[in-house]
Amino acid sequence: MNRFEGPGGREAKIRYLDGDFQVLAPGAFVRCAVTGEPIPLEDLKYWSVARQEPYRNVEASLERELEINPQLGKPR
């Protein structure tokens, strides 16, 4: 059994705040909004407060930001 299975292996419900997050429903992980990969709560470091979504890493965060705001990726 892997760490996301069993009774403690539920997906958490989170409210993302500036520099912190609040657990609304307990669980062991959240899913990356870009890749769908599970992110253990102890490893959660990247999220968007405005979009209320978590990201696996900085690359996934940047990918989402460029998807939402494509003008950011264009040279000036």
Image (spheres, grey):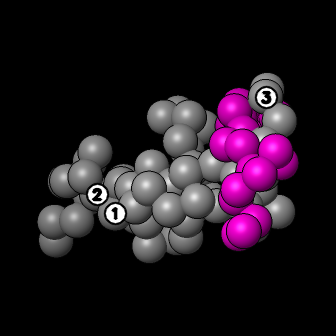
Residue underneath mark 3: 25
Near-viewer residue (50 or 37): 37
Residue at 28% x, 57% y is 66
Dot 2, crowdedness within 10 Å: few (<14), some or many (≥20)? some
Relative vertical location of residue 57 with respect to residue 18 in this rendering, above or below = below
Residue 15 among those drawn in magenta: yes
Dot 1, crowdedness within 10 Å: few (<14), some or many (≥20)? some
Residue 64 coordinates in the image, percent (x, y):
36, 54
Which region of the structure is painted magenta?
Answer: 1-23
The kind of residue tagged 3 is Ala
Quarter of the picture holding the N terminus: bottom right
Near-viewer residue (36 or 73): 36
Quarter of the picture holding the C terminus: bottom left
Residue 39 coordinates in the image, percent (x, y):
64, 61
Residue underneath mark 2: 66
17 to the left or right of 51: right
Q: Secondary structure at mark 2?
A: helix
Q: Earlier in the sequence, mark 2 or mark 3?
A: 3
Residue underneath mark 1: 63
